[in-house]
Image (cartoon, rainbow, N blue to C red):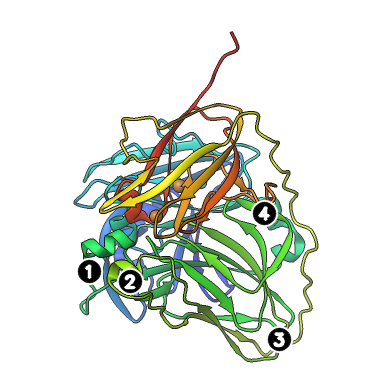
Amino acid sequence: MLIMDRKNNITRRRLVGAGAALLGMFNAPTLLHGATQTMVVQSEGGLLEAEIEAVEAWTPLGASYARLFTYNTQFPGLRLEARAGDTVRLRFTNRLLESTNLHFHGLHVPPTGNADNAFLEVPPGESFNYQFVLPTNHPCGTFWYHPHLHGLAARQVSRGLAGLFIIRGELDEIPAIANATEHFLVLKDWALDRSGEVLEPSVMQRMIGREGSLLTVGNATSPKFSILPGGLLRLRILNASASRFYRLKLEEHPMYVIATDGGPLSAPNAVSEILLTPGERIDVLIQGSRETGIYCLFNLPYNRGGMAMMGGPSRLAPPEVLATFAYEFSADSAAELPKTLVNVDPLPEPEGPVRRFTLSESGMKFLINGREFDHRRVDTQVRLGTVEDWEIFNQGSMDHPFHLHTNPFQILDAAGQPERAWKDVMLVPAGQRRRFRVKFADFQGKAFYHCHILDHEDLGMMGVVEMVAVSES
Ligand code: C2O
Ligand code: CU
Ligand code: CU
């Protein structure tokens, strides 16, 4: 089913069936609508099928146009929506002048073959059919896809290659949540010149992690959302920036977290601020409980380190308005927050010792356990079916958000207890140690772990974990 989703507005129209009609639309750019629409493809009868084309295109961005790398000429790319148990078939074509590939960030699917295989390279002009089945017990949540070619990841993501991959399920069926107005906020920064061309980063900017000064939500600058008095808004937020961290605060409104990276929480968790590092997602409810007016979603300053490299003391940017929320004039709708969500069981204690990783920076090299990434090497071998605790020690001067493919994890709190939330990115602040617990379930093969500041990944801060089935002999 193909739907045009007019952002900031709850009306949805079904246009045409899926499949070939979809491709037809992309070949007819005159049919593509302006700055406020994202294409959505939903699974039907257990099958999600879509065409995804990486192509450079002049794309509406904020008040103007920019020459971006896009999926299907849009930013963000097609929003894919499936359910646990569905088969996913994506025909991917690379129309860029350089190689690329797809990675399905956060999905628990095989990292091999034609599934979430980030070792693959799709050369310019070629196509590849990605196909996998979502396990029937796959958590519902907000996932995303982006390119993952070592050395080009930061470049390609920063130029606009990103799309949401939503898995609908139990959380979406809780009445208060099903009735909430849902918005998708893909946060992205852009470094553009005045004509709308993407600027090449300097060596220093790559070491720190490239950032752009133009901030958009989707392709809009400070979009306006409406709140119904007494009603609930659901915001699914993705940080699709290559390096930028976001520290989010909504004026006078607490945000009730209902899901983190990889799935729902057991109960809503009220927070006044959210730090969202690259690759992370958060799903929050906002209650329209304040006086009628307009409220700003701010991005507050945060120092992730690296400023010393710029030769000065840390200079923090002023808060910026990412979006505004305006109360509608209407009768009170008196929606209540759900009390419970979806139970998350803590993972059992591991039998083996803690596995340790040290992140370090040395000049232009970004290392894990003293080594630069090499795709031919297996850095870490784990047994399929086992639970492990991983400790990440950040010896560097910058914060590094650590990401693991294929299997989500539970972050261990200060007391060593697993948080009841599924994550796949864990911030490890400079000079600190953090632990998570992970179960290597279901899938054999090699997968990546890396810093999700994609320049750091491209500069070597990535390793290979191989999950091996060991037969009892
Ligand atoms: Cu979103 Cu290996 O990355
Ligand atoms: Cu990933
Ligand atoms: Cu890093």
Contact check, label 1 and label 2, Cβ < 8 Å: yes
The structure residue drawn at horizontal position 68% and vertical position 81%, both measured from the top left corner, is 228
Q: For mark 2, give the secondary structure.
A: loop
Tell me which numbered mark, 3 or 2, is placed earlier along the sequence. 2
Q: For mark 1, give the secondary structure.
A: loop
Q: Which residue is mark 2?
A: 212
Along the viewing direction, whichever of 403 and 356 lies nearer the viewer: 356
Tell me which numbered mark, 1 or 2, is placed earlier along the sequence. 1
The answer for how far apart the CA atoms under marks 4 and 2 are is 31 Å
Density class for disc 2 (Cα within 10 Å; few <14, some 14-19, many ≥20) is: some
> Mark 3 is on which residue type?
Arg
Q: Which residue is mark 1?
A: 199
Residue 175: tell me if it is visible: yes
> Mark 1 is on which residue type?
Leu
Q: Which residue is mark 4?
A: 264
Tell me which numbered mark, 4 or 2, is placed earlier along the sequence. 2
